Amino acid sequence: MPTLPDDQRDVHAQGQILAFVVDDLEAELARLQGEGVEITMPLTAEEWGERAFQVRDPNGVIVQLVDWNGPTAG
């Protein structure tokens, strides 16, 4: 990108995940799919309550959108 300094223009990220907690995971998934974004990890639910999916930005950074639906104490 020409707006970046010369020493940053050709640097690509490797092995990084940037995670964002969102309020409506399904809505974000539908929005991104509707915009043609490739989902690189499908919506996954873990037994500890985390739900997430991932996309990859043009620089190779994995962006994970996540919410938490863990069990509540009763």
Image (cartoon, helix red, strand yellow):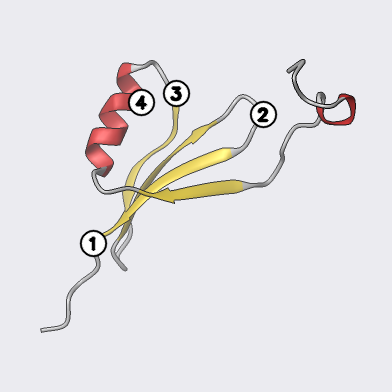
**First in residue order: circle 2 vs circle 3:** 3
Q: Which mark is residue 59?
A: 2
Q: Where is residue 43? Give x, y as percent.
A: 32, 42
Specify which label sits upstream in the sequence, 1 or 3. Answer: 3
State the residue position of label 1.
69
Kind of residue indicated by mark 3: Glu
Sequence-earlier tag: 1 or 2? 2
Asked which quadrant contains residue 41, the reply is top left
Amino acid carrying label 4: it is Leu
| Residue that carries the numbered disc 4 in the rendered image | 32
x, y (%) of residue 50? 33, 59
Dot 3 or dot 4: first in sequence order is 4
Residue at 32%, 48% in the rendered image: 22
- Could you tell me which quadrant the N terminus lies in? top right
* Closer to us: 4 or 52: 4
| Residue depicted at 48% across the width and 49% down the height | 19
Relative horizontal placement of residue 22, taking residue 57 as reference (left or right): left
Mark 2 or mark 4: which comes first in sequence?
A: 4
Marks 3 and 4, how far apart at CA:
8 Å
Q: Which mark is residue 38?
A: 3
Q: CA distance from mark 1 to mark 2?
A: 31 Å
Which residue is at the far right?
7
Labels 2 & 4 near each other (Cβ < 8 A)? no
Describe residue 23's horizontal placement relative to residue 10 as left or right.
Answer: left
Helix, strand or loop at mark 3: loop
Q: Nearer the viewer, residue 46 or 22?
A: 22
Q: What is the spatial separation of the Cα atoms under label 1 and label 3, in whole angstroms?
A: 25 Å
What residue do we see at 31% from left, 68% from top?
Answer: 48
Q: Nearer the viewer, mark 2 or mark 3?
A: 2
Q: Nearer the viewer, residue 71 or 35?
A: 35
